[in-house]
Amino acid sequence: MTDPASAADRRSRVLADGNEIPLLGLGVWQIPDGRECEDAVRWALAAGYRHIDTAQAYRNERSVGRALRDSGVPRDEVFLTTKFFPGHRDPEQEVQRSLERLGVDFVDLYIIHWPQGGPTWAWDGMQRAHERGYARSIGVSNFDVAELSSLFEVAEVPPVVDQVQFSPFEFRRGLLSACEQRDVAIEAYSPLGTGRHLGDRRVAGIADRLGRTPAQVLIRWALQRGLVVLPKSTHRERIESNAQVFDFALTDEDMAALDGLDRTGGTDRAQENAWW
Ligand code: A2P
C-alpha cells in the first residue's frame, strides 16, 4: 500500500490519459481581471507553482496569459487549465477564444464548468477540442457520481478529472471513491472553504501544534487524501506560504480528526446547491 504521507511528497501525478499534473495549483476564481490577477499569477510562478487554474466564467484569462508570458517561465513547464462556460454552445469554438485570450496554443486541461443542461451534451465538443490539440486533457467540474456515470457511457475519450469543492468539511467520500475506481482525479476547489475554514478551532489547534498555518494544514490534508488542490490567494506572502506543504506530514490521528469535520455525510454529490 502507498503511504499517503510519502505519496503527497510527490509534486505531481499522472492522469488516466498519461499526462502529468502538478498536485498544487493556484486557483484564480474571484480575482478580477487586471493587475490583481496578474500579480497573483506572477507571484505564484515565482514561488514555484507550475499549475494555474482559470475559467471562461472568471473573465481573467487575459491576465493569466499576460502574467505567464511576463514570468519568463517556459510555457511547457506550466500546467494551464481553463473551463468551458456551459451557457455557451460549442466547447471547441469557445476553447479557441480562450486560447486567444490566454495567448497560448493549447491548454493542458479543459473542463466543463458545471453540468448545466445535462452531463453529456457538451462532451462531443470537448472531444473535438482534445482531438484538434487545443486541450491536452479533458474533464469536468461539479459532476456527481450519477452524472459521471452517464458521461462514461457515451465518452470515447473519458474525462480524467472532476473538479469539486473539497475540504475536510466537504469530505465527499462517496464521490472520491467512485472517482478512484474510474481513475478520475479529484481536484479540490475552495480547499480553504473560501477562507471560512481557516478560523475553525480544530484546524487551528493542529496548525498551532505543528507550527504551521491553518491553510497549510488544509492543503496538506488534501494532498494526503490524494487530491489535486487549488487554493486561491491574492496576497504574495499567502501564495508563498500555501506552497510550503511538501516539508511536513499530518499523522494518521490528525488526518482522522480532520476527516471527522465532514458535514456532507460522506456524500457522492458534487455540491449541495446547484446554481444553474
Ligand atoms: P486572499 O485572496 O485575500 O489572500 P479558497 O482557496 O478556499 O477559495 O480560499 C480563498 C480565501 O482564503 C481567500 O479569501 C484568501 O484571501 C484566503 N486565504 C488564502 N490563503 C490564505 C492564508 N494562507 N491565510 C489566510 N487567508 C488565506
Image (cartoon, rainbow, N blue to C red):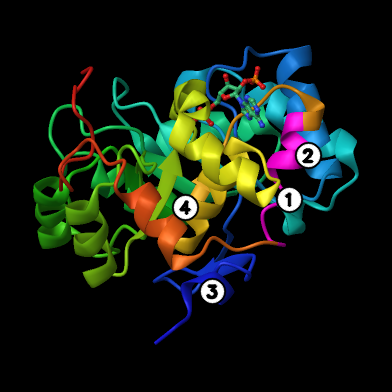
Callout 4–callout 2 Cβ contact below 8 Å: no
Q: What element carries label 1?
A: loop
Earlier in the chain: of badge 3 and badge 4, it is 3
Give the numbered dot on residue 240.
2
Q: Is mark 3 on a helix, strand or loop?
A: helix
Residue that carries the numbered disc 4 in the rendered image: 222
Callout 2–callout 1 Cβ contact below 8 Å: yes
Number of numbered tags placed on the structure image = 4
Q: Does the residue labelled 3 lie within 8 Å of ligand 1?
A: no
Callout 1–callout 3 Cβ contact below 8 Å: no
Alpha-carbon distance for marks 2 and 1? 7 Å
Earlier in the chain: of badge 2 and badge 3, it is 3
Assess whether residue 100 is covered by the magenta stretch: no
Q: What stretch is highlighted in magenta?
A: 238-247
Q: In this view, does 100 lie to the left or right of 181?
A: right
Earlier in the chain: of badge 4 and badge 1, it is 4
Residue 73: where, in percent of width, then height?
85, 49
Earlier in the chain: of badge 1 and badge 3, it is 3
Residue at the spot 47% in from the left edge and 52% down from the top edge:
222
Alpha-carbon distance for marks 1 and 3? 16 Å
Q: What residue type is labelled 3?
A: Ala
Q: In this view, does 106 lie to the left or right of 82?
A: right
- Dividing the image into 4 quarters, which one contains the C terminus? top left
Residue that carries the numbered disc 1 in the rendered image: 244
Residue 74: where, in percent of width, then height?
83, 53
